[in-house]
Every structure is written in structure tokens, then in C-alpha cells.
Amino acid sequence: MSEPSTALEPIVSARGLRKSFGRKPILHGLDFDIPPGRIYGLVGHNGAGKTTTLNAMLGLTSYEGTIRVLGEDPFARRAHLMENVAFISDVASLPRFLRVRELFALLTNIHPNFSQEKARQFLEGTDIRPEMKIKALSKGMMAQLHLAVVMAIDAKLLVLDEPTLGLDITYRKRFYRRLLEDYMTEERTLIITTHQVDEIEFMLSDIMFIRDGELILHMQMETVSEKFSQLVANEPEAQEAARALGPVYEETRFGQTVFIFDGVPRETLEPLGKVSTPTLSDLFVALMQRPTANPESAR
Ligand SMILES: Nc1ncnc2c1ncn2[C@@H]1O[C@H](COP(=O)(O)OP(=O)(O)OP(=O)(O)O)[C@@H](O)[C@H]1O
């Protein structure tokens, strides 16, 4: 077996990462390491703190605690770090007054790792042409152009905050496939946030769930499928037996009762009904509803 990736120098490392806006605490002391060559999904409700976490990594916001990206402090060394980091954040925008080819020329001049050739390749199959003015593009085309530009940067870390917002389903699927096939290598690390987690589940190597500024799950996808199980049980006796095993979640859907378990062996569950690995969106819903502090008194 190859060496576990956690033994490699992390691409991003956070210790006690905190952030408040005014008096409102947003991040409550996050600790994590992201090794190279991984594809991370960062998932959480609106306002959970995903963008704030990414902005801290990108040196776009101040913070307390420690964060290192490629071994450097992103806030202090932002300009230098950006040679090896590419990102799309929800606030980023393209210069609207330029034509597409002028944007490429500009980026060639300012970014040492930008390839015009690659950007053009990523635009194949879209309706975007080099002569078009950026301000004349539709919202979706603008997003396509943005993605093409970002993927044309030879970066060690690519951060995508809701990259496919406003894009149609055909393009979204094609984008994720190309990202996986044409962009990812063992030296590159990808961090994606999206609310459409089922669309990216197939490509993720690791998952982070963030709730109210706290990391409630940080796990390799392989471990997720070993640790968590979903059981669909129809008979009342089987449902009672399932409840006795301490599910982390229970829900009745279309007359069927669905349970999610953490760390209960599948052999124990199989006699009770149909067992599978929960999808990330089901697991997310289950874990988001679990009480954080003092579960005993919550009952
Ligand atoms: N510049 C700011 N000033 C004040 N509060 C802010 C600022 N930016 C973010 N916040 C607050 O911080 C919290 C976390 O916001 P953040 O954008 O990180 O959430 P998110 O998980 O990315 O949400 P979404 O899925 O909606 O994009 C929210 O309560 C938000 O209102």
C-alpha cells in the first residue's frame, strides 16, 4: 500500500481558526489539514461560514489563529501565494469592458502560470468567442468564461466557491467531468463548496461538513462509507430493533422508515431491512440535526 496521504506536507493547515464580524463570532476555532492531491467538498447551510473559511485561506479576510497555505501565511503573503493558487469566489468578477481575447492577453501578462491555449480549449463547446465583449455575455456564459480562465492557471490549489451557480445541468456535469479529467493531478488540490452536493459526490476524496462555524465532520469518503450506514426498515419490530441500536437519524419517507447509523456494523443491520451507504445529502441532513452540546439534556 502507498503511504497515507496524511503523511505528506499539508497544502492547507488551520489551527484554532476564528473569525468574528463585529461582535458576532462566525468561525469558532477550526482545526484541519488538507493534504495534496485531494478533492475536498466543503458543505454547510447558508451562513455556516464556508466562504469565510475559504476567504481566510485566500488571504482575503483577517482571522485569529493560524492558517498556512503551501506553508505560508495567506494574509501576509497573498500576492506571492496567488502564483500557485487559483480561485473563484462568489464576489469575484471579470473586467466587463474587455473582449474575451483581451482578457486572455491581460492574464498572460499578469499571471505567470496562465495558459491562453488552455483557456481556449476549455471554452470549446461553449458559445463564447474571442471577439465577444464580456459585458455582452449571459450570466451563465460569464460563469463559463470564469471557470475556463481559472482552470487555465497552473495552480497547486484550486478553490471553487459555488462554481456552477447559474449554470445549466448539462454544463455543470461537463464542467465537473473536465475538472476531474483535464485538471486534477496528484500535485493539485481542489476545494469546492456547493449546495448541490449530490452532483460532486462522485469526484470527492474527502468531505467537510461545517455547521454554525464548527467542523462537525472531516473525513475521507472511504471512511464515510465504512462508518455510516442507511437502513430502510418497514416492519414495526424491525424499526423498534433499529431504534434500540441508537441511530443518529430517523425519518419516515413515503411510508418507509429510514435510519442512519454511525459505527454500527452492517451485519447487525442487514437482518432488519435494506442497508446501503447514505448519500452525502442524506448524511448532511442527518448530522446537521444532531444536537451539538449535551445531547442528554436535549431529550
Ligand atoms: N463582511 C461581512 N460582514 C458581516 N458579516 C458577514 C460578512 N461576511 C459574512 N458575514 C456573516 O458571516 C456568516 C457566514 O457567512 P459565509 O458567507 O461564510 O457563509 P456560507 O457558509 O458561505 O453561506 P452561503 O452558503 O450562504 O454562501 C453569515 O452569518 C454572514 O452574515
Image (tube, rainbow, N blue to C red):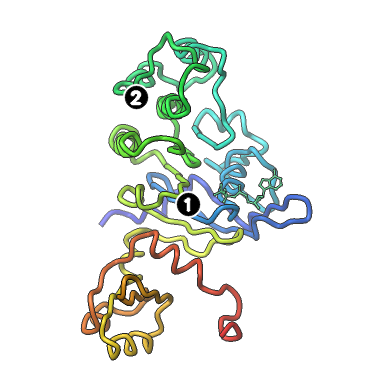
Residue 152: image quadrant is: top left
Residue 97: image quadrant is: top right
**Residue count near mark 2 (Cα–Cα under 10 Å), binned few <14, some 14–19, many ≥20:** many
Q: Position of residue 241 (x, y in %)?
A: 32, 89
Q: CA distance from mark 1 to mark 2?
A: 25 Å
Q: Residue at x 25, y 57 (%)?
A: 1
Q: Residue at x 78, y 55 (%)?
A: 23
The residue type indicated by label 1 comes to Leu
Q: Secondary structure at mark 1?
A: strand
Q: Is residue 198 above or below residue 73?
A: below
Q: Label 2: which residue?
A: 122
Q: Which mark is residue 126?
A: none
Q: Is residue 171 above or below residue 220?
A: above
Is 28 situated left or right of 179 in this image? right
Quarter of the C terminus within the rendering: bottom right
Q: Is residue 258 visible?
A: yes
Q: Label 1: which residue?
A: 42
The residue type indicated by label 2 comes to Phe
Q: Is residue 263 above or below residue 196?
A: below
Q: Position of residue 43 (x, y in %)?
A: 48, 54
